[in-house]
Image (spheres, rainbow, N blue to C red):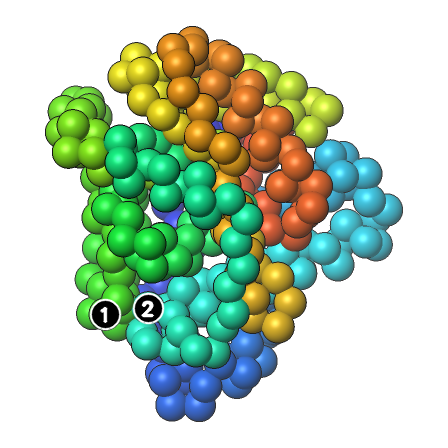
Amino acid sequence: MPSWKGKTRGGLLGYKIFIFILKNLGLNPAYFVLRFVAAYFVIFAPSSTRSIFHYFRKIKHYGALKSFTSVYQCYYVFGQTILDKVAIASGMQDKFSYTSNGIENIEELKKTGGVIISAHLGNWDIAGLLLKKIDLKTNVLMFEAEHEKIKDYLNQVMKDNPVKVIPISQDLSHIFKVNEVLKNKEVICMHGDRFMEGSRTMEKTFMGKPAIFPLGPFSIVSKLDVPYSFAFAVRGRNREYHFSASPIIRGKQNPEEVLEQYIAQLEKKLNAYPLQWFNFYDFWSKEVKGAVA
């Protein structure tokens, strides 16, 4: 079964080099260096390159040449979103522009609390920075799998990070924290497209082929009977980020119904932004266990 292995590529030195360039030379020189780094990953990250090539070739049905060039572009855009996140959180917000569609839906959650479900498509960290503007108390439920030294370093660099993290624990103690946050009428943000081995899952048709999804996020919404929305932040041209959120859904539904709603929203977004699918493992395979680039 294709599960995320809880590891992210890249060492502390690489982050420090990019942030040095970012702070001393600016965004454009950092993007220039990133072009070479993206090419490096195409060659020296064969597992993730093979998986993302499969996505473009077999799921998006691109030709072989377009699939190969799209792999490079995908790595490059992924790197841009990381640089942009650091730049924005380091005080360079004026170098970016933002548009939104459905932000009023998220504002509704300020009254009641609730759940926002997103995906590893675009950059949710930047969405969190945008949500700060509407004074939304935001908590992100996530796997604590980043290298600690990298996390500590980025926390020092990114002075403006309004999002609180609730780490997912093996003993499920994070569920108590989720309950507490929702009782305080705050918002929980979760990704619904990635799971660790051993998690409860469900197979669904996604982009025309069977894929495995975690049941956890959708079970939380169902069991706690809270209002929820599906939201994404994607990168456009000229350093523009676009935030979108579906209308708030209320009323008791089972996890499978919530998952089906999520898949419908995710397919629309992925069709519009195919280069911003950042699950760098064989998402549609039942046999291959991959790693994230």
Left or right of residue 192, residue 40 in this image: right
Left or right of residue 165, residue 227 in this image: right
- State whether residue 14 appears in this view: no
> In terms of depth relative to the viewer, which is nearer, 259 or 31?
259
> In terms of depth relative to the viewer, which is nearer, 202 or 57?
202
| Quadrant assignment, res 261 | top right
- State whether residue 25 appears in this view: yes
Q: Image point 36% across, 37% down: which residue?
A: 108
> In terms of depth relative to the viewer, which is nearer, 284 or 260?
260
Tag 1–tag 2 contact (CB < 8 Å): yes
> Which element type, helix, strand or loop, lies under badge 2?
helix
On screen, 293 above or below 188?
below
| Quadrant assignment, res 210 | top right
On screen, 214 above or below 96?
above
* Residue highlighted by disc 1: 159
Q: CA distance from mark 1 to mark 2?
A: 6 Å
Q: Image point 62% across, 41% down: which residue?
A: 269
Residue 129 position in % (x across, y down): 35, 59
Residue 164 position in % (x across, y down): 21, 48
* Residue highlighted by disc 2: 89
> Which element type, helix, strand or loop, lies under badge 1?
loop
Q: Image point 58% across, 26% down: which residue?
A: 263
Residue 226 position in % (x across, y down): 32, 22
Left or right of residue 154, residue 193 in this image: right
